[in-house]
């Protein structure tokens, strides 16, 4: 039963993530789900708030005929699956709820970064503050570890930011990546933030090499990097203890 409840919450959260991913990059306040077409002002009713429901009905905006994007369904389904899996990994209620909340933030960051090459301060700043506050009640991290993780994440990616700027030019690594690393450090603590950064760099390197080898991108193309860090953070939130134990022998 708990898996079904978390799946349902995840589906709803996926709808919220879709709405935020549409509105926040445009610098507009969150509003009720609406047509993505900028020339259309149609606001969906409750029966069409979720992308899945819109696809099941007719898949189009009733006013302008704009098709429902595949992304909104993918985000809702993926979030539902991830949320449904969380009770399997965490039995402590506090850890379960907070870690699931972290997953939602990271999914939101991935979606916005992939589509807009942006990591917004409105996600990372509050996320960092909340992670520091949650360190008071989470059983597997304390405030000292969270603060140290935030500082280490910030400093490491600050160095990478300046190195990439002078080596590859502006845009290779964005300031949002630095803020994301800081937030991850507050969520994960020490030494998990170090492992997460290594995993993120590895994922980014492997993916970039594949895209270059298949000529899907050009050598000087600046690819969004935040999703690799966010995925690494998600991996460490779930399997961090086992990975750290293996790395430390």
Image (spheres, rainbow, N blue to C red):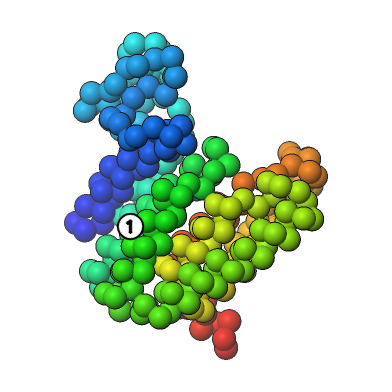
Q: Is residue 153 left or right of residue 237?
A: right
In the picture, the quarter occupied by the N terminus is: bottom left
Q: Crowding near pointer 1: few (<14 within 10 Å), some, many (20+)? A: some
Q: How many numbered circles does the render carry?
A: 1
Residue lying furthest left in this view?
A: 1
**Quick check: 81 above or below 90?**
above
Q: Position of residue 85 (x, y in %)?
A: 35, 59
Residue 137 lies, with reference to residue 176, above or below; the image says below
Which residue occupies 28% across, 30% down? 32
Q: Position of residue 103 (x, y in %)?
A: 39, 56
Q: Is residue 76 visible?
A: no
Q: Position of residue 166 (x, y in %)?
A: 77, 55
Residue at point 51% right, 83% down? 245
Q: Work out whether 16 lies above or below 129.
A: above
Q: Front-most of 247 and 42? A: 42
Q: Is residue 109 above or below residue 65?
A: below
**Residue ID at (70%, 59%):** 162
The residue wearing badge 1 is 101
Q: Helix or strand or loop: what does disc 1 sit on?
A: helix
Q: Viewer-proximal residue, 64 or 242?
A: 64
Q: Residue at x 28, y 23 (%)?
A: 44
Q: Which quadrant of the figure has residue 222?
A: top right
The answer to whether residue 75 is seen in the rendering is yes
**Quadrant in the picture for the C terminus:** bottom right
Q: Nearer the viewer, residue 176 or 209?
A: 176
């Amino acid at each position: 039963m708990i898996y079904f409840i978390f799946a349902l919450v995840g589906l709803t959260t996926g709808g919220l993530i879709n709405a935020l991913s549409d509105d926040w990059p445009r610098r507009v306040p969150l509003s009720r789900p609406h047509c993505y077409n900028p020339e259309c002002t149609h606001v969906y009713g409750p029966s069409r708030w979720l992308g899945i429901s819109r696809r099941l009905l007719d898949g189009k905006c009733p006013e302008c005929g704009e098709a429902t994007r595949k992304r909104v369904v993918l985000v809702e389904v993926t979030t539902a699956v991830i949320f449904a899996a969380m009770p399997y990994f965490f039995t402590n209620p506090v850890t379960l709820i907070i870690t699931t909340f972290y997953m939602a933030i990271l999914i939101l960051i991935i979606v916005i970064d992939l589509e807009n090459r942006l990591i917004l301060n409105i996600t990372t700043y509050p996320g960092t503050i909340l992670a520091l506050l949650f360190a008071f009640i989470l059983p597997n991290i304390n405030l000292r570890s969270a603060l140290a993780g935030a500082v280490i994440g910030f400093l490491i990616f600050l160095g990478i930011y300046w190195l990439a700027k002078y080596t590859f030019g502006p845009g290779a690594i964005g300031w949002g990546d630095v803020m994301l690393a800081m937030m991850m450090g507050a969520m994960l603590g020490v030494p998990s933030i170090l492992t997460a950064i290594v995993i993120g760099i590895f994922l980014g390197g492997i993916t970039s090499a594949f895209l270059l080898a298949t000529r899907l991108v050009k050598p000087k193309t600046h690819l969004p990097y935040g999703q690799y860090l966010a995925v690494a953070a998600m991996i460490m939130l779930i399997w961090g203890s086992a990975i750290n134990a293996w790395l430390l022998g």
